Amino acid sequence: MNEELIPFQGVLDVLLDENKDITRLHLTEFSDIDPTSLKALNETWPRIELSRKLLLLDKLYDLAEKDTLVAFDELGKSLLNDSEPGVILRALRLLNECQDVRLFPTYLDLLTSNDDVKVRAEAASILGLYVNLGEFDEIPENIHHQIEDALLDILNGEDEPFVRRYALEALGFSSRVELPVLIESAYNREDPDWMASAVFAMGRSNNSERWAEQVLHEILSENPQIRLAAIQAAGKLELEMARPILLDLLEEEFDDQISEAAIWSLSQIGGENVRAHLENLLDAHEDDDQTAILEDALDNLVFTEDMTNLNLMALDADEPKEIDLEE
């Protein structure tokens, strides 16, 4: 069914009137926004109440999390120089999957110069995307190293611990030789916040051999923040030893965030009983949100199983073939 089209001036009128609801139809008008509409928004923006701006940006972020067909990159880019920290923070979140390398100088400036601690932390977080791209040679090497150096300066500097922890998490993707020591140091602080960030970075490291023991141990942590980070890390590292722990956890866990993380990690690990368990959960749930999470996990499990089969086929192809000497 085709959605009704709303003239963009009508969207602006809604933003200016605090008594009107901002509906999904209004939100979709900001996806891949055209230059003319963006110009009209920028001209109207100063007249919109701050609370209304923040509401709009929060709704756009929620929509982007649920609908992969919408993209608010152009809007996010246009708001990075806003005077309000709350607007900048939400603009960064709208750009959390944008790979435009031209943005990195702005992010570095926000990281090092912005007065708001949440904005600096979010800038550190989004720079992790570029660290990861650099590991796959998808951005120029000099830019990759410049970003890593800036994050290392923050991590080892005097900024707020909140910002420094986000820098560590962003650096989790990095293969720099000093990173394992920095992650280990953060983990050994015995400060729950630092430990959670360290475990999160472990999950991004692609180094299951180095971090499996710590991650498996923290899956059963009594601290929910550390526990969540460990469950997520187990999936990213595809730790098969975590599979029975996570399956048992789903039988007794009542925290939705922990359960959802366990479901997704199991879809990344795959293997024995995972499909049957997720399908049984899907049959048992009537909640729409939980059903969507399980369906996404089952879709991801298909990808995991396909990759596992490809790897097994590659191993079979590499095995030496027996030669029949009697031929």
Image: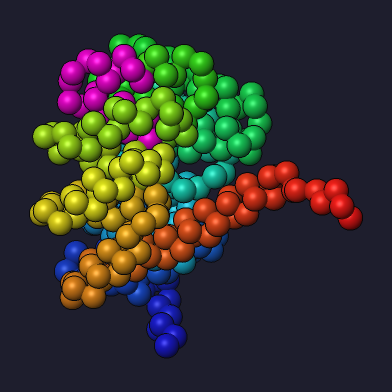
Total marks drawn? 0
Q: Is residue 200 magenta?
A: yes
The magenta-colored residue range is 183-203
- Looking at the picture, tell me which residue is in the foreground, 276 or 218: 276
Magenta region's main secondary structure?
helix
Q: Is residue 310 magenta?
A: no
- Quadrant the C terminus occupies: bottom right
- Quadrant the N terminus occupies: bottom left
In this rendering, the answer to whether 28 lies above or below 181 is below
**Residue in the image at 22% along x and 15% along y:** 189
The answer to whether residue 98 of the structure is visible from this angle is: yes
Q: Residue 224 occupies which quadrant of the picture? A: top left
Is 55 positioned to the left or the right of 303 in the image? left
**Residue in the image at 16% along x and 34% along y:** 221
Query: What x and y, as percent, mark residue 69?
Result: 46, 66
Q: Residue 47 occupies which quadrant of the picture? A: bottom left
- Looking at the picture, tell me which residue is in the foreground, 57 or 291: 291
Q: Which residue reaches farthest front?
A: 326
Query: What x and y, as percent, mark residue 66?
Result: 34, 63
